Image (spheres, grey):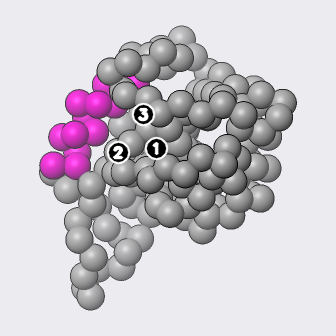
Amino acid sequence: MKVLLIRHGEAVERSENLKDRDRALTSKGREKLAMSISYLKTALKNKKIRVCSSPQLRAIQTAEYLSNDIDIQDFVASGSLDEFKQYVLHQREFDILIIVGHEPYLSSWIYSLTKQSIEVKKGMLVELIWPSQLGQVLKLKEYQRIDL
């Protein structure tokens, strides 16, 4: 199974009047995602996929570019590595698992699984090949060059 980790797109800035979980994507963030994720959607045709998202609005909005059927999981927002591993292990019926989340948790999971230090920027996609052993191969992918 392949696991795609995607950081949410650019969101509105933090403010006293807006809870962090309610921060939405900016129009610029939406434009960038619409353009880049179109390549990914093409590559996902005829694949059995599961899209999982943090419950935070900006992550859900990012995930909606990929599917209307989103599995919202609190561990994506809290960063629990153990819950992440357990969740992935229970998704084996899918060809591709896409998790839309946040920094620093995505980078932390990648490091824990691969010992590679990567800063996952907004809208960035990281592919983990998930064999029976956890996360042995890591590839940074450009949406335009994705081959699933």
**In the image, is residue 73 above or below residue 18?**
above
Task: Work out how far the residue at label 2 is from the one at label 1, CA to CA, in angstroms.
Answer: 6 Å
Q: Position of residue 121 (x, y in %)?
A: 37, 51
The three-letter amino acid code for the residue at tag 3 is Leu
Residue at the far bottom in the pictured view = 16
Q: Which residues are magenta?
A: 28-40
Front label number (3 vs 2): 2
Per the image, label 3 sits on a secondary structure element best described as loop
Q: Position of residue 33 (x, y in %)?
A: 28, 39
Instruction: Look at the numbered discs 2 and 1 and tell me whether their residues touch, using CB distance below 8 Å.
Output: yes
Q: Please rate how many residues cluster around mark 1, counting C-alpha atoms within 10 Å: few if below 14, some from 14 to 19, many from 20.
A: many
Task: Work out how far the residue at label 3 is from the one at label 2, CA to CA, in angstroms.
Answer: 13 Å
Q: Please rate how many residues cluster around mark 2, counting C-alpha atoms within 10 Å: few if below 14, some from 14 to 19, many from 20.
A: many
Per the image, label 1 sits on a secondary structure element best described as strand
The three-letter amino acid code for the residue at tag 2 is Gly
Q: Which residue is mark 1?
A: 6
Q: Which mark is residue 66?
A: 3
